[in-house]
Amino acid sequence: MLVEPGELVIFNLAELTEHLIWHKSLVTRLRVVQESKDSYGERVVTDRHDNVERIERRYRAETRRVTRVVLTNKRRIVRLWTAAATQRQAWERVRAVVPWSRLDHMRCRGTVFQEGNADDERVLIDGLVGLWNTPAQVIEGIEEVGDSVWMASGDTIAEDAVLAGPVWIGRSGASSQGICAIGPTWLPDQQITADSPIVSARVRPIGEVELDEQVKPDIGDGVRPGYAFAKRTFDIVVSFVVLLLALPLLGVVALCILLDDGRPFFYGHVRQTRGGREFRCWKFRTMQRDADTMTDAVAKDNLCDGPQVFIKNDPRVTRVGGILRRFQIDELPQFWNVLLGDMSVVGPRPSPEVENQYCPAWREIRLSVRPGITGRWQTERTRAQGRDFQEWIRYDIEYVQRAGFWYDLYLCVRTAWVLLRGRDNRASQ
């Protein structure tokens, strides 16, 4: 593995082994992406006077660092690489001698450490202490003086020292009185005194947690196998039948849209499904092609108190679009999303990430199930001034808590009644 001088890159080679074996490339250029571990995070954004402007929420891991390494088993390529002054020059030399057909490119997640970066060095050692049981195989001049307690050969430990491995001890790190170190941890070189003992405890790995300590949700179609199977079967059968029966109508609707406002026939908006995974939610286009650019101009007429936009007699809606919306015909392409497994027939309304950020607890509950074409909020909302967002939260939580096969059937019947009344008070695309 060839890397930049001063860099240490760690990744799971086992995940790449099959690809490397089958492709048999002379050189594999690997793009290693380091992402944050936490899927949720918040950041306070302030202006130049340190006044709080907003709070940004992140629900997916963010990319922190990217580096490129080269994998090869040919010595002549290694010599070319090590003789070059820069990585760019090294890569140019490699490409000059290796046919393009024998080059491969891959991407994987990993961790990148930089020499001289104190934070990187600390994080690296923190991780190694808990995982590496035999450091003496690589690091010379160290010995095991206790159960998983390693220190430099010839150093002494204070008589009253309390060391519970795994612990790595730097030069003279445990020679002072009053030392207490509970692993996995490490003591730096000559940094420990009797006045500043180090006590370090780590959270146990999840594999060691007793079952009764784990919090198991009692909601969501992902934790009730019987209901999950029945619901998915129902989704597949219904979506397939609806798409088959509606096939002639789909062509007629597409023709009407073409004659009224041209192409495209469909509008695909990026929404989030169970677990926060993003997908493209399809509808027949009911708005003008430049509707997204007009949102700010019509926002003053928005009747919603939450993140959505609902405007009576919305000027962005086309003539054909108004009819499609009135009878919910524009929702028909979503049955394709149901067939693919991105959505369900019944569930919370599919929403984009920007809307789901408004209430983290509500977001986690509603994304514990697949979003639906219809659901509790879709059929019961009143659009009462100042209560719309509160109703949205209430009905989503109520659906997840009560979710069951017969409750889903009830909501389907309720939806049919709403369709017969021809009500349309939905948010914009």
Image (cartoon, rainbow, N blue to C red):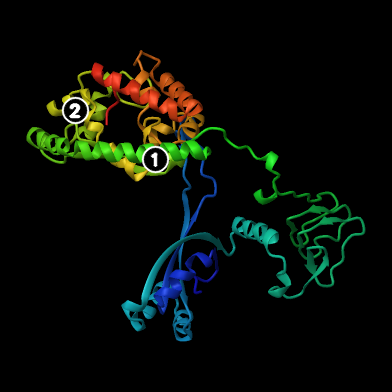
Say how many tags the image has: 2
Q: Earlier in the sequence, mark 1 or mark 2?
A: 1
| Residue drawn where x is 80% and y is 61% of the image | 173
What amino acid type is highlighted by mark number 2?
A: Leu
Mark toward the viewer: 1 or 2: 1
Q: CA distance from mark 1 to mark 2?
A: 28 Å
User: What is the x, y in percent for residue 376?
Assistant: 40, 23
Give the labeled residue for mark 2: 324
As displayed, is residue 12 above or below residue 41? below
Residue at 59 percent of width and 63 percent of height: 116
Under mark 1, the amino acid is Thr
Q: Does dot 1 land on a helix, a strand or a loop?
A: helix
Whether residue 375 is visible here, answered yes or no, is yes
Q: In this figure, which residue is indicated by the disc labeled 1?
A: 233
Q: Is residue 135 left or right of residue 220?
A: right
Q: Is residue 330 above or below residue 130?
A: above
Q: Is residue 15 left or right of residue 346?
A: right
